[in-house]
Amino acid sequence: MTNVSDLVDAAVAADDKLTKTQAKAIIDGVFKAISDAAVKGEEVSIPGFGKFKVQAKPARTGRNPATGATIEIAASKKVAFTPAKQLKDAVNG
């Protein structure tokens, strides 16, 4: 699994003028911008990569697996990612 540290190392390797501190600040800034937009309910589209958008999940009835009792699951929101065609094609070779 790739983490932020790996992304920073890859960014520095791709551009020798970029320091690790600068790369980390850029990467953190991108993630913060995506998070802030999601909190506001806005869609973030990154051409060639994909879209992040907030989707509403309605309330529903569920079941407690231990007891079998019926429970109400509250409505909520989730962040969904839809990959761009270029990313799908690259992943699928």
Image (cartoon, grey):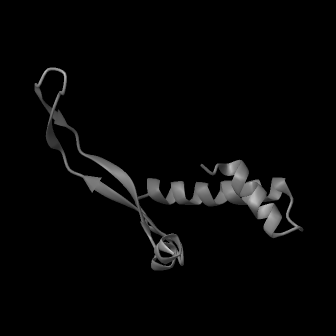
Q: Is residue 91 left or right of residue 81?
A: right
Nearest to the observer: residue 17 or residue 42: 17
Nearest to the observer: residue 30 or residue 48: 48
Residue 62: percent from the left, percent from the top?
15, 36
Q: How many marks?
A: 0
| Residue under the point 83% across and 55% down | 20
Residue 81: percent from the left, percent from the top?
42, 62
Q: Is residue 35 left or right of residue 61?
A: right
Residue 64: percent from the left, percent from the top?
17, 27
Q: Residue furthest top?
A: 67
Nearest to the observer: residue 50 or residue 65: 65
| Residue under the point 60% across and 56% down | 31
Q: Is residue 58 left or right of residue 93?
A: left
Q: Is residue 51 above or below residue 66?
A: below
Which quadrant of the structure image shows residue 23? bottom right
Which quadrant of the structure image shows residue 34? bottom right
Residue 47: percent from the left, percent from the top?
53, 78
Nearest to the observer: residue 74 or residue 4: 4
